[in-house]
Every structure is written in structure tokens, then in C-alpha cells.
Image (tube, grey):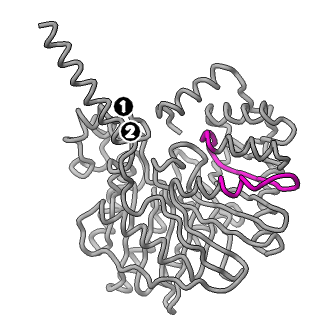
Amino acid sequence: MARGAATLCLIITLAWGSCAVWNSVKPLPRGTRVASLPARLDESQVDFLDDLAPPGALLKRETEAIGRAEQTIVLNQSPLARELADALLLRKRQRPNLKIMLVTDPRNEVYGGTPSRTLSALERTGIVVVRTRLERLRDPNPLYSSLWRLCVGWWSDPFDETPGKATLRSSLRRRNLKADGRQLLVADDGAGGWTSIVMSAASTGAAASIGGAVSAGLGVEIRGHLAAAIVASELQLAAWSTDDDRLPAAPPADSRGVGTIDARFLTEGAIQAALRDAIAIAGSGDSIKIAVQAFGDRKMVDAVVRAAARGARVQLLLDPGSPETQAAAGELLREEPGSIEVRWRARDSRAEAGYAVIQHRSDVWFDVGSANFTRRALDDLDLAADIELHMPARAGPARAVTDLFAKHWSNAAAYASHADESTETYWRYRVAEATGLSVF
């Protein structure tokens, strides 16, 4: 009896461990970890959209892009603002042959995001709604997710449950800590060109307001190039998330273009690689300016500390609501107190802008998008999308982003106002980050 119980326990442990290892290292699905070829842009093809000045700038640009489309609209957003849903419905009625595809996180129907009736209304008009199959991604929380896959996942399908109702199965699935965080839109402009918008947060709108607070973010609009790479990635996500055969066609391949700005579309782990490459060559006389909600990825912490040790000036503008971020900030200041500065964004501002400005003498690297600088966002676990721009420091867009950070920095709170340098908080962050139990 005892031997049988021990054998059973061993089998369960091996199955649990094998499932955890496999789903931590399994091949990435198609369309993830994308680093597009550089596209050369003119300054007139790039616009920065700060949702706080004027309010609603991102939403306005998105609705305008939707209103111009004649052939294709591809949108990945969670939650979907009601105004955008209305714009999609209106344009589809105006242009019945217009191909529209919305990719969205399936959890939003249950956990207070896009109402299920909104998605149903879109589907009734012929719009393709793709709910990302998050279980096909790697597991950020393997200790829990392996048990979930063995005991619950095989009979818990989000597509079989009633949207809008938080059941036990949906609550258990939520603890897998997975999300489609991409925030982007691509649409033809009705005149043979394409508009691409990549954002750090969902557009401000009625559906983006949660608990009475309105999200705000930063975005970049690119006209002409990168549309093909962005849509190709989204179509690959859709291919393994749905059996719908009405997916739109990809735009024609982009030419390199002319201008002084090199732009790339980056997703998931490719974002981390690009940021680390740009930070790795920063040294004396250079500057690194980072504004994100959450910061704690160990590779990014190491890269920033090394750059500061080489003489680069580092400024971090972070959200004080995360103990893990507070712990990482304290570690950075202990490592390089003279070269690294930290300030906090206001707790009630709900600003979700995520971007980095890295200046190397006469060149500026700018990265903006939905990725926080955390393990989940940068280690090929959650879905995220950014745009990277490499441009001369004298270029108008480079000056604009530098001025934007200066404005955000001047309005931020001093580090001491939200500092948490306790040993308990630090080691809780390190253990949670290393094991995957961290929620950030």
C-alpha cells in the first residue's frame, strides 16, 4: 500500500515537473518575438501621440484612421474603447467589403474589460473577432500553470464558458498570469498608403475607464512603412487562435524608404534584446531615460547598472504602486547612487506611458509600446508590441520625446516619497521574479 502510494506520488511529481519545464521552454508560437527589418522614414511620417495633451489624442487618431480605411483594418486592443467599437461598426456599414480583424485578450469579457455584447455586435456585422488562445504561450508561472494544465486546462476552455460571468474555471485560468497586452492598429489610408499606430495603453474612452479612472498613454503613428510586418505578426497570432477563414490579406511588402529615421516593429523578447543593445553602448556623456509602470526584469536591471557604472546618466520614472518596482528601484540606487535617479508618477494619474529615450551623443534611440520592463513582458511570456526609432538627436521627433520626458520628470514625485528599501520587500521581489510567482 505504502509502496503504491509512493509510486503514485512519484508519477504525479514527474508529470508536474515535466509539464512545468516543457511549457517554460517550448517553441514560441508563430508571430511572436518579431524584430522587423528597419524601415527608413522621413520626419513627416512620424507623429507622437501623448494622450494627456490634448486629452484623447490617441483615440482621435485611431478613429480617424478607421474612418479613412477602404480595404483593411487590423486592431489588437484590450479592452476596446466603446468609441472605437462604434467607429468600426459605422465603417463596416459604410464599406461592407472592408476587411476588419480585431484581436483581443479573451479574459476581458469576464474581468471588466470589453463587454461581450460589444464583441458580439462586431461579429454580427462580419468583423472577425479573434480571442487570443493564451494557453499556447509559455507559462510565466510554471509551478501553478503545470497543475492547471494537468487538472483543469484540458476541460476549461474560455470559448465554452459564458462571457461576462466569472466562474471557478475562469478564476483558476486567470491565475496563469497571461495576457495579450499588444495595443496597435493598422489601416489603409484609402489612397494606397498605410497608417500604423502602436500604443503603450488602451485608448482613452468609456470602455477604457475602469473603476472611474481613465487610462492615458503614449503612442506613435507611422505612415507608410512597417504595416506589412505588423499585420503579418497579427495574422499569425490569429491563425493559431481561431479557425475563421475570413482573415484579411497582408499589405504588400514595404520598401526601405528614404529619410533620417530607422524604425522597427518589435514584440516580446525582441524588445528586451533591442533595449539591451542600445543600453550596452551607453557610457560617459550619454543618457538613459525610462518611463514605465513596472520595472524589475533582472537583465534590464543589470544593463542599467552597467551603463551607469560606465558613466551614463540614468533617470527612471516609475509607478509607485508595485512593491516589486519599489524594490528594484532601491537596488539600482544602492548599486549606483551617483548616476541613477528615480522619481515616481502620481498614483492617481493612471498614466500608463511606457517608453525609453537613450541618447548616444548625436543619436537617439526611442522605444515606445505596451511592454513594461518586467520578466513577463520581456521574456517571451505575455504578448507585447513596441516601435523602436533610431534617429539623429537634431531630428524633430528626437527633440519632441526628449522634451516629453522632461515634462513628465518635472511633474513627478521625489524618490523618498514612495521609497521601500526593506529587506523583506526586496527578497520577496527576487523570489517571486525568479520562480514566476510574481504578478507583474
Q: Quadrant of residue 169?
A: top left
Give, as a three-letter code, the residue at label 1: Tyr
Residue count near mark 2 (Cα–Cα under 10 Å), binned few <14, some 14–19, many ≥20: many
Examine the structure image and report whether residue 282 is included in the region drawn in magenta.
yes
> Which range is magenta?
276-299
Whether pointer 2 and pointer 1 mark residues with C-beta atoms closer than 8 Å, the reply is yes
The CA span between labels 2 and 1 is: 7 Å
Instruction: Residue at 82%, 46% (x, y): give it.
Output: 310
Examine the structure image and report whether residue 227 is included in the region drawn in magenta.
no
Quadrant including the N terminus: top left
Residue count near mark 1 (Cα–Cα under 10 Å), binned few <14, some 14–19, many ≥20: some
Query: Who is closer to the viewer here, 135 or 303?
Result: 303
Q: Secondary structure at mark 1?
A: helix
Is 145 rendered above or below residue 254? above
Query: Who is closer to the viewer here, 366 or 217?
Result: 366
Instruction: Residue at 78%, 42% (x, y): give it.
Output: 343
Instruction: Residue at 60%, 41% (x, y): give it.
Output: 297
Instruction: Residue at 29%, 29% (x, y): give it.
Output: 16
Query: Who is closer to the viewer here, 85 or 271?
Result: 271
x%, y% of residue 148? 29, 34
